Amino acid sequence: MPRRTLSRCRCRDNRNAHAASYNLPMPVISCPDCGREVSTFAPACPHCGRPSPAGGAPMPAAVASPVAEETLWKGTPSPKVLIGRVVGLILIAVLIPLAARWTATHTADLDQAARITKIGWLITAVIFVFQLIRLGIALMRIRSTLYTVTNQRIIVENGIISKALSEIDLRTIDDTQFFQSVSARMLGIGDIMIISSDKSQPAFMLHNIENPRALRETIRSHAYAVSQRQLFTRAT
C-alpha cells in the first residue's frame, strides 16, 4: 500500500477513536415535570426549566457521628467543710459550762453561784441548739447540691425544697482553675472555677470538691477533646 494512503487511514482511525470517546452515553434522569430526559450534569431541565434534582442538589456535608453521653463524675460538695462547725459545737458544749463553773466557784454567795451555773448551762443550750440548726441546714444544702460531669456538659442541680438545674456545655469552656486554702488542702478538698464563653454563666464555681486537681484535669481534657472534634467537623 502506498505510504500516503496508509497515513490517511491512520488519521481516519484516530478521528474515529476521538469521536467515539466524545460520544460516550451521558447519564440522564427523567424530569419530574415534563418527563423528558435530562442530563445529571445539567443544573435545570432544558425543556421546561425545572431545576434538576441531580444537578442542583448540593453535595451532602460530612456529618459527624453522634457521641453517646457518658457520666465521667458525679458527686456533691464534701461534708468535710463542716468539720469546723462540729468542732465549734464541741467547744461551746465544753467551754461555756466550764467558764460558768469557774465563775461560780469564785463566788461567795451560794445562791448566786447556783444562778451563775444555771445561766451558764442555759446559754450553752441556746447557743448549741442554734449552731446545731445551722449545721443541719448547711448539711442539707450540701446534700441537695449535685454536680454531674459528662463528656458533653457539666450539670449543676441544687435546691432543698424547690429544684434548679443549670448546665455548661463543654464546647464553651475556655479555662479551668482550682483553689485550695491551707485548711482545705489539709482536708483534701478545693474549689474549681470554670470560665466559659456562655453569657449567662461566664464563670461558675464547683465548691468543696474532693480531689479537685483530678476533676479539673478531667474537665479540661474532655473540653479540649470536644473542641477539637468540633473544629474537625467544621473543617470537613
Image (cartoon, helix red, strand yellow):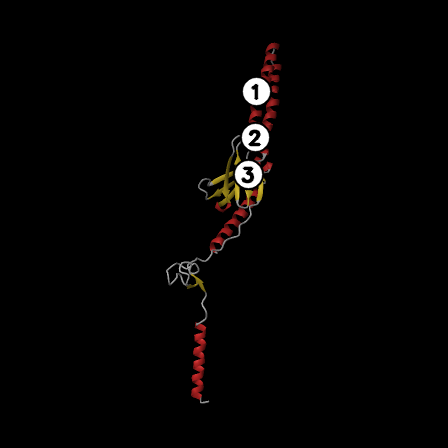
Q: Is residue 25 left or right of residue 114?
A: left
Task: Find disc 1 in the rendering and name its residue.
Answer: 126
Q: Secondary structure at mark 2?
A: helix
> Residue 203: horizontal and vertical position, in percent?
47, 40
Task: Find disc 2 in the rendering and name its residue.
Answer: 140
Number of numbered discs overlaid on the protein picture: 3
As rendered, which of 191 and 38 lies closer to the eye?
A: 38
Q: Is residue 9 visible?
A: yes
What's the residue type where badge 3 is placed?
Tyr
Q: Nearer the viewer, mark 3 or mark 1?
A: 3
Task: Find disc 3 in the rendering and name its residue.
Answer: 147
What's the residue type where badge 2 is placed?
Met
The image quadrant of residue 160 is top right
Q: CA distance from mark 3 to mark 1?
A: 35 Å
Q: CA distance from mark 2 to mark 3?
A: 15 Å
* Residue ID at (58%, 44%): 72
* Residue ID at (59%, 31%): 83
**Callout 2 environment at 10 Å: few (<14), some (14 to 19), or many (20+)?**
few
Q: In the rendered image of this protein, does residue 220 appear above or below residue 53?
A: above
Q: In the rendered image of this protein, does residue 147 appear above or below residue 112?
A: below
Q: CA distance from mark 2 to mark 1?
A: 21 Å
**Callout 3 environment at 10 Å: few (<14), some (14 to 19), or many (20+)?**
some
Q: Secondary structure at mark 1?
A: helix
As rendered, which of 118 and 215 lies closer to the eye?
A: 215
